[in-house]
Image (tube, coloured by chain):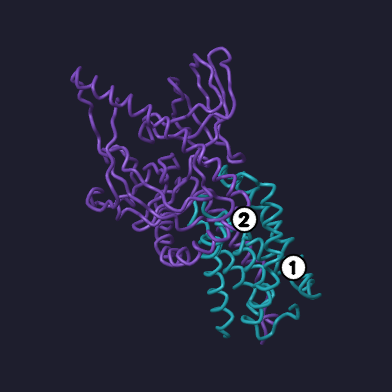
Amino acid sequence: MTPKDRADRSLPTFVTLLVLAILLMTVDVRLSGEGVVGVMRGGTQTLLAPMQKAATFVVDPVAEFLDSLTEITSLREQVGALQAELAEAQRLLAENEEKLARLETLERLYGLDLVETEVGRTVANVIARPDQFDLAFLIDKGTTNGVIEGQPVIDEFGFAVGIVTEASPHTALVVPILASRNQLTVLTGSQTGLLSSNPALTEMKLDVFDARDSVQAGDQVVTAAGAFPAGLAVGEVIEAAEPVSTALTARVRPFVELDRLRVVIVLAWPPDPTAATTTTTTTSVPPEEETSGTTETTEEGG
Amino acid sequence: MRLRPLIVGVAALLVAVVLQTTLVSRFRFVSPDLVVLVVIVFALSGLRREIILLLAFTGGLVMDLLGPTVLGLRATVATVAAYLAIRTASRVDLGPVAVALWVGAITLASMALFVLIGTLFGQGAVIASGLGRRMALVPLANLVLSFPIASVLTRMMSTDPRGVM
């Protein structure tokens, strides 16, 4: 008997699966990814992580080689531009060293004692991206390494990347700020604003509601304390904008290059774990025992 | 019951999921949807139609579980793509070019469905940058890849291919 000879039950099967899929969507939306859905996601990610790690191990050199082939023509221009940037950075560094020395002298004179908070760092590899429609990506560190939901993620240059939204024992899912529906509180100069993303664009929108000054093209946008530690570079203003009444809107280009991300750093932020958003997937292992990588010291209120 | 097509089908789906989430996502300009491509090609094999639909649903569900989008979104898309493929597979027995065009058309329909359902369920993140470019390039990439993949998969899975490849 061939498959054709059997009774064709494809339509009832199709309808059943479609109904099941709609039910799953409804349940997922209602549970907001928590409960059973969260456990299922964690389990699947844990099961497939070894295969994804192995594939990434093979794929990375190939992908980087192909990337370099496509960029070979622009490399000379990039080298020239980088040399100019380096010269400018060295000049600024010399200036800043002078200022830092003066600052240290003044702090000593006035007896300032800054409160210091240690922020744990977990270095992780990007092992997978769900598909071409998602900017979110999987990393190879999870709750056993102290990575929990809600922790901020930065890249190797210290630029803000995104937030951990799911954490299973050995992997975690990171949603970049560029794809997040949540607004990010940022500072540009002395003004506080909200940075929001538009999934259809590669740039972000900055809204300052009590604007006093205009912003100029190239002005840096940094994180304010909240989801991220304060002072992390997020991006730069693309073009100058003037306040209208007390509101100001500007376009911001994020610094992070999501296509090129291979290694990221998860910050154990906020420093008090009880203040972090936790889920049922959170491990009872103290983060500091399992956290790999180095520990950084940041200054709050400085 | 012939187990070989089923085993090859499950293995192909697993490989498609792993490659989709590791290799394919690294390329900025060539982005096939391997899971959709594989489930469409299943329609050309000797697998039972119900099994093809179940495999498509499972493949889509695994992709859902690996990503941040709502659970069931890609499962719906893959199941609909598989059903369209099952219903139209008998009309593309004109050779590899017809199969490639057929794969491209069903992929385009599945992309449109993905964006539509994603938007309806408030999945703003699924409508990432360069949507128009991707809507054009994903079906095109699937169309090109269907030549080798359809040829290899139908040979491996079917003792009685439906006269297509």
User: Where residue B23 sits in the image (x, y, percent)?
Assistant: 54, 62
Q: From the viewer's perspective, is residue A136 above or below residue A15?
A: above
A230 lies left or right of A16: left
Dot 1 falls on which chain? B
User: Callout 2: few (<14), some (14-19), or many (20+) C-alpha neighbours within 10 Å?
Assistant: few
The residue positioned 50% from the left and 21% from the top of the image is A208
Q: Is residue B89 left or right of residue A249?
A: right
Give whichever of B1, A250 is nearer the camera: A250
Q: Quadrant of the N terminus of chain A?
A: bottom right
Q: Position of residue B133 (x, y in %)?
A: 69, 49
Q: Quadrant of the C terminus of chain A?
A: top left
* Above or below, B8 relative to A296: below
Q: Three-letter amino acid code at disc 2?
A: Thr
- Of badges 1 and 2, the one in the foreground is 2
Using the image as rendered, state which of residue B151 and residue B120 is in the foreground. Answer: B151
What amino acid is at disc 1?
A: Ala
Q: What residue is shown with label 2?
A: A70
Above-or-below relation of A194 to A175: above
Tell me, yes or no, whether the two marked residues, 1 and 2, touch with CB atoms within 8 Å. Answer: no
* Image coordinates for residue B111, horizontal then vertical, percent: 66, 54
Point 67% across, 57% down: residue: B138
Calculate the distance from the C-alpha at mark 1 to the C-alpha at mark 2.
Answer: 27 Å
For the question of whether residue A242 can be seen, the reply is: yes
Which hue is chain B drawn in? cyan
Q: Does residue A27 appear in the picture of this structure?
A: no
Left or right of residue B82, residue A79 in this image:
left
> Label 2's element?
helix
Q: Nearer the viewer, residue B87 or A105?
A: A105
The mark found on residue B100 in the picture is: 1
Chain painted in purple in the figure: A
On whether disc 1 and disc 2 are found on a single subunit, the reply is no
**x and y percent of residue A27 in the render?**
49, 50
